Image (spheres, rainbow, N blue to C red):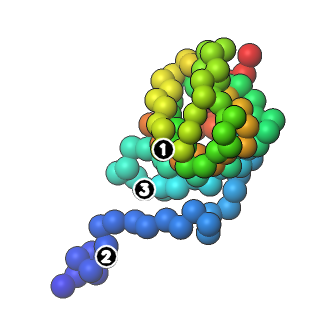
Amino acid sequence: MSQTDSMPRYQIVDFSELEGVACPCGTARRAFADVADFPATVHQTDISLDARAHYHRRLTEVYYILECGPDAQLELDDQRLPIAPGRAILIPPGVRHRAIGQMKVLVVVVPKFDPADEWFD
């Protein structure tokens, strides 16, 4: 058996072992950016109280709410929507968005996250 045959064809990430990176939303831990044949990245993001509204020109994001307070909201193109754990929100390119209130979200970004594609008004 060759070394290639013995290498696993899957990857496992423990988000608690990833370094947090400051982002307009708070702190993101980004996974799978280095996996060439995976077309997305997956982020666990801790939203801060001062999250900034922003948008992406190329990226599509899916926010899956893991934890949040009872008054947490997501602002999408100036419309505020209540959120709760277990909900998923698809945010296509061009939609201005920000989270309101502290929360923890899982974000799937397609194509892979690019910090150069964060835009502010």
Instruction: Assess disc 1: are there few (<14), some (14-19) or many (≥20) residues with their C-alpha within 10 Å of its C-alpha.
Output: few
Question: Farthest residue in the front direction?
Answer: 70
Q: Is residue 5 above or below residue 67?
A: below
Question: Farthest residue in the left direction?
Answer: 1
Instruction: Assess disc 2: are there few (<14), some (14-19) or many (≥20) residues with their C-alpha within 10 Å of its C-alpha.
Output: few
Earlier sequence position, callout 3 versus callout 1: 3
Q: Is residue 35 above or below residue 24?
A: below
Quick one: SS at disc 3? loop
Is 33 or 12 nearer to us in this picture? 12
Tell me the quarter of the image containing the N terminus.
Answer: bottom left
Asked if the residue at tag 2 contacts the one at tag 1, i.e. Cβ–Cβ closer than 8 Å, the answer is no
Q: Check disc 1 and report the residue beneath it.
A: 86
Real-space CA distance between mark 3 and mark 2, rounded to the nearest whole angstrom: 14 Å
Which-is-in-front pick, marks 3 and 1?
Answer: 1
The picture quadrant where one finds residue 114 is top right
Earlier sequence position, callout 3 versus callout 2: 2
Q: Check disc 2 and report the residue beneath it.
A: 7
Q: Please tell me which residue is depicted at 62% across the width and 66% down the height of the picture.
A: 16
Question: Farthest residue in the bottom direction?
Answer: 1
Real-space CA distance between mark 3 and mark 1, rounded to the nearest whole angstrom: 27 Å
Q: Please tell me which residue is depicted at 31% across the width and 73% down the height of the picture.
A: 8
**Residue 21 is at least partly visible in this image:** yes
Q: Please tell me which residue is depicted at 74% across the width and 16% down the height of the picture.
A: 121
Q: Is residue 32 above or below residue 56?
A: below
* Residue 41 image label: none
Q: Check disc 3 and report the residue beneath it.
A: 35
Q: Callout 1, which amino acid?
A: Gly
Quick one: SS at disc 1? loop
Q: Callout 2, which amino acid?
A: Met
Real-space CA distance between mark 1 and mark 2, rounded to the nearest whole angstrom: 34 Å
